[in-house]
Amino acid sequence: MHNEEPCVAEFVRRTDAAMRAIGRTYEIVVVSDGSTDGTERILRELHAAHPNLRGIFLSRNTGQCNAMYAGIQESRGDMVIVMDGDLQHLPEEIHLLVAAMDTGHALVSGSRGRRQESLVLRRIPSRIANWMLRRVTGCPIRDMGGFKALRGDMARSLRLRPGHHRLLPALVWMRGGSVGEVIVSAPPRFAGQSHYGLSRSVDVFFDIVMLWFQGAAKSRPIYLFGRIGIVVLIVDVALGLWLLYDKFFRGEALTGRPLFFVVVMMFIVSLFTIATGFILELLSDAVNTVGRVHPYTVRERVGR
């Protein structure tokens, strides 16, 4: 939550009631992303009546993804439900995600039906972004953002960077996790103003491009850049042989032809591209080693 004072009490009341109806042990983790209104004061007051409520207050506004990441890392459950605090995700529909998770999925996404948001500012950009994500990652989920349920161990193992909160199904899918989807409601905000506008679509586009790059050629930069470099080099060699043929059999000068300079530039580009692949490969390995990131997730262990 960021400055969601009008929504806090209603969100906690309805979420607590929905979880008690499900009948499982639970906690409600509310992250205040540097709120400057009465959000945090209300959470402190609500804790007395709702012992399962936990408030995580961030020192400053860091953005939705970082706030979500903090909440996931603070969570302790076998299952993690991720939802917004403005009640556009209905607590009364949490049971739909839980039931789908019980079938064995690593993630279940709530696909918003009959969205009541602006067609131009929200729905059309969202459809385009979701289509691009399906094409880039192969993840079959129709609605990547919003209401989600994840296996707790999977959720806490993810290293989310800014923008990744929109890509959770794709991230889990790319790690080999099973994903599912259920239809959920998409009511208007309970109160307050939306923090998003059309400018977010540009950010989403770059997030998708970055995700494609990370997942291209099985997360091996040398495979991607190496193949590009080899293709450029093959074309360059073919053009070079053509120039040599013209020189020795037709007597045409090499340096007087624009194609000669194209061949030289393509050769440099091919070497640069292959070298970039090697450099990124080393950097990727270093980052994974330092961050202790594994390219897989163990679903189950038998025995101690």
Image (tube, rainbow, N blue to C red):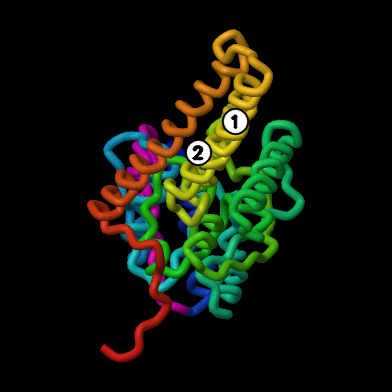
Residue 52 location (% of width, % of height): 36, 66
Quadrant in which the C terminus appears? bottom left
- The answer to whether residue 214 is above or below residue 234 is below
Where is residue 273, by image quadrant?
A: top left
Which is in the foreground here, disc 1 or disc 2? 1
> Mark 1 belongs to which amino acid?
Leu
> Mark 2 belongs to which amino acid?
Gly
Where is residue 201, by image quadrant?
A: top right
The residue singled out by tag 2 in the image is 229
- The answer to whether residue 259 is above or below residue 108 is above
Which one is in front, 173 or 235?
235
Whether residue 37 sits left or right of residue 198 in the image: it is left
The residue singled out by tag 1 in the image is 241
Q: Residue at x 56, y 61 (%)?
A: 91
Mark 1: which secondary structure? helix
Which mark sits nearer the N-terminus, 1 or 2?
A: 2
How far apart marks 1 and 2 lie (CA) works out to: 18 Å
Residue 190 location (% of width, % of height): 60, 45
Q: Identify the magenta region.
A: 24-43
